Amino acid sequence: MTKVTAKVIPVLMILWFQLIFPATARGQTTFTQEDRKILIELKAALTQIDKRFEQVDKRFDQVDKRFAELRQDMNNRFEQFMSFVWILAAIFGAMTGVTIGFALWDRRTMIRPFETKVSELDKGIKNNRENYDQLIAVLKEYASKNKKFADIIQSFNLF
């Protein structure tokens, strides 16, 4: 055999097998009606899966909206609580200020009568001091004239 015939024989054998054993006999089938039905069913199943995914996405969106609403509600409540705390602090501060003001007012009104009494007593003491000084001057004058009286006053260390 020559080189050309050695190359041609395998090609001819392949062609001969192709003719004798068609593609259906080898297990390779062409696109059939049943395959078309299967593809249609697959498309329907994929469509249903897509719908389910859309429903799941909608549910996630609803959950996200609910979380946003809950967060907003919590923020509103926190703001209300902080406002309440500020109001309580203002009330406490006002009560403290009023109490201190009342205490100062009460002290001043309570001290005024004592101040007037003390000033009256001070005037009385000054008046008594003047009278005492006059009395001492009179006694000294009398003691200078009466020797016996001068001895008595000196015994009590009044001069």
Image (tube, rainbow, N blue to C red):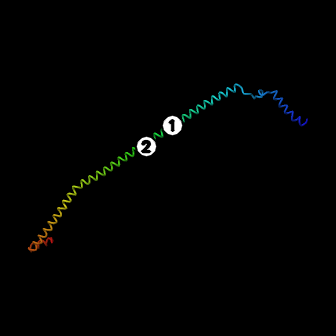
Q: Residue 27's x, y, as percent?
A: 76, 28
Please report the residue visible at 18 percent of the width from the left and 62 percent of the height from the top.
123
Please report the residue visible at 69 percent of the width from the left and 26 percent of the height from the top.
36
Give SS at disc 1. helix
Which of 136 and 37 lies nearest the eye of the viewer? 37
Which of 38 and 150 lies nearest the eye of the viewer? 38
Q: Residue 58 appears in which quarter of the rendering?
A: top right
* Marking on residue 150: none
- From this view, report whether residue 102 is shown above or below residue 119: above
In three-dimensional space, the C-alpha distance between marks 1 and 2, rounded to whole angstroms, equals: 21 Å
Which of 114 and 47 lies nearest the eye of the viewer? 47
Q: Is residue 1 left or right of residue 106?
A: right
Q: Is residue 46 left or right of residue 10?
A: left
Quadrant position of the N terminus in the picture:
top right
Mark 2 Cα-neighbour bin, 10 Å: few <14, some 14–19, many ≥20: few
Residue position for label 2: 79
Which of 143 and 104 lies nearest the eye of the viewer? 104
Identify the amino acid type marked 1: Lys
Please report the residue visible at 57 percent of the width from the left and 33 percent of the height from the top.
54
Count of marks overlaid on the render: 2
Give SS at disc 2. helix
Task: Report the residue that reaches farthest toward the top.
Answer: 33
- From this view, report whether residue 82 is shown above or below residue 13: below
Q: Residue 69's x, y, as percent?
A: 48, 38
Please report the residue visible at 61 percent of the width from the left and 30 percent of the height from the top.
47
Closer to the N terminus: mark 1 or mark 2?
1
Q: Is residue 152 left or right of residue 88?
A: left
Mark 1 Cα-neighbour bin, 10 Å: few <14, some 14–19, many ≥20: few
Q: Residue 99's x, y, as percent?
A: 30, 50
Residue position for label 1: 65
Identify the amino acid type marked 2: Glu
Disc 1 + disc 2, Cβ < 8 Å: no
